[in-house]
Image (tube, rainbow, N blue to C red):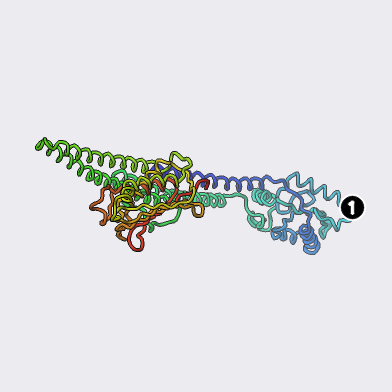
Amino acid sequence: MGRLFWKFFLCILLAQVAATIGVGGVFWLRDQARQRATPVLDSGPPAAIALDAAAATLRHGGLPALRSLLPDMRRPQLFVLDASRHELLGRAVPAELMHAVERELRDGAQGGDSAVWRGARRLVGPGGEQYIAFVSRDFGRQIGRVGREAGPQDGLRDGAGPDTLTPGLGPGPGPRRRIGQSVVIGATVLASLLFAALLAWYFSRPIRALRSAFEAAAAGDLAPRFGPGAKGGDELVDLGRDFDRMSARLRALMDGQRRLLHDVSHELRSPLARMQAALGLAHQQPDKIGITLERIERESNRMDKLIGELLTLSRLEASPDVLRREPVDLVELVDGLVADARFEAGQAEAAAADDHGTALRVDFDADDSVNVSGDPDLLWSALENVVRNAARHGAPGGVVAVSVRAVDGVARVEVCDRGPGIAPEDLSAIFQPFFRSGASRTGVDGHGLGLAIAQRVVQAHDGEILVANRDGGGLQVTITLPAAGR
């Protein structure tokens, strides 16, 4: 059990104990208020009925019958005083209640009709004895306690014990009641302890699992630990699944970095080996130093280009958001790229001197103006890689068609060639760094970074790049970017 478990446990336990003390305090205050309540003379209809019954019992059965009736009058409680103001069952009457009885009798005497007095009445026995009968409200606990303390010497007769005098009044907070209250409070505390322990365990268990997962990840183990079969569906389980997604992403990034390092090492080793071979040839044949220097220069340019592409790719992966945005006219941008591609393909020379028509032709079709918001340098790099890739893999004498259109609020650039295309099983991996399909691995200069850079640039501009084989052979690359102002 960790510290978090005990924090949960103690907080929940304190809340439960506070609630228990609060509820118990409310009941205790209520009992105290009832015990201290000032007795009030009852003058309602039930009291009138009880007084009528007492008058009839005294008139027809005498004092013994009335005394036997009083313990049976539970609700409402009936009290009878004799001429010396002693209660027939020995129950003491507080002075406040006696004042209320006398006031009621005085008001009734002034009314002139004693038969309708309801709060208190004067009763007359068969021998002319005078009695006072009344009903008290909220007086049961005090009368019951005083009656038990009065004893036989205060008027308890006919074998009536303290507990049989006022069975409806209920005993005061005696030992049994105190024991019952203690049992209830103890059971509540135990239930609170159990509930607090269960809830603390419920919260701390997935957190402990997350901690062990973090420790394993720190040690290099990024295997998933909270699969779809994890029990529960609360936020803690969702947090575990998020950790699995994070670890899977980290594992993919680490694998990609290892693969990238391997590919970079391989790509750099080849030009370095050729440069070393050229240096060895220069030492052996000093007369061919010029050819050797040209070879070394060509290989160094290849290495410089590779390192530049790697730096661009690394920058895009480290900061996927475009830091600089400004209006860019795609038509003007792509037009310059097409002009460079035509020059490199030798289309101008072919139009004047190549009678066989073997030169590659680059066609360009565009709207008047298609504007986007982005980084001009990055967009130039991405589109240059796509156009150069098409020109590099296009069939001799074929056509590379480049178009720029504004369609439904997006800018669309399409580059189509009639080259060998891509094997269907390689289409999903074409944007991976250093990937080259089987049809383009030989006879074509390149490192397999162009489309990887193009994809990351387009995604950084909230766009999309798609690659598909064309009917009849060749490849179609479609780039869509949000138009300016959207």
User: Farthest residue in the left direction?
Assistant: 284
Q: Is residue 241 above or below residue 310?
A: below
Q: Is 372 or 40 nearer to us in this picture?
A: 372
Residue 340 in sight here: yes
* Local crowd size for mark 1, using a 10 Å CA cut-off: few (<14), some (14–19), many (≥20): few
Q: Secondary structure at mark 1?
A: helix
| Above or below for 135 versus 299 | below
In the rendered image, residue 315, in percent from the top left (x then y), is placed at 36, 40
- Name the amino acid, label 1: Gly
Q: Position of residue 82 (x, y in %)?
A: 78, 52
Left or right: residue 156 compared with residue 426: right
**Where in the figure is residue 322, as x and y percent of width and height?**
43, 41
- Left or right of residue 4, residue 169 in this image: right
Q: Residue at x 83, y 58 (%)?
A: 127
- Which residue is tagged 1? 111
At a point 25% along the width and 40% down the height, the residue shown is 303
Q: Residue at x 32, y 40 (%)?
A: 311
Q: Quadrant of the N terminus?
A: top left
Q: Where is residue 313 shown, x and y percent of the image?
A: 34, 43
1 or 104: nearer the eye?
A: 1
Q: Is residue 456 above or below residue 49?
A: above
Q: Is residue 62 visible?
A: no
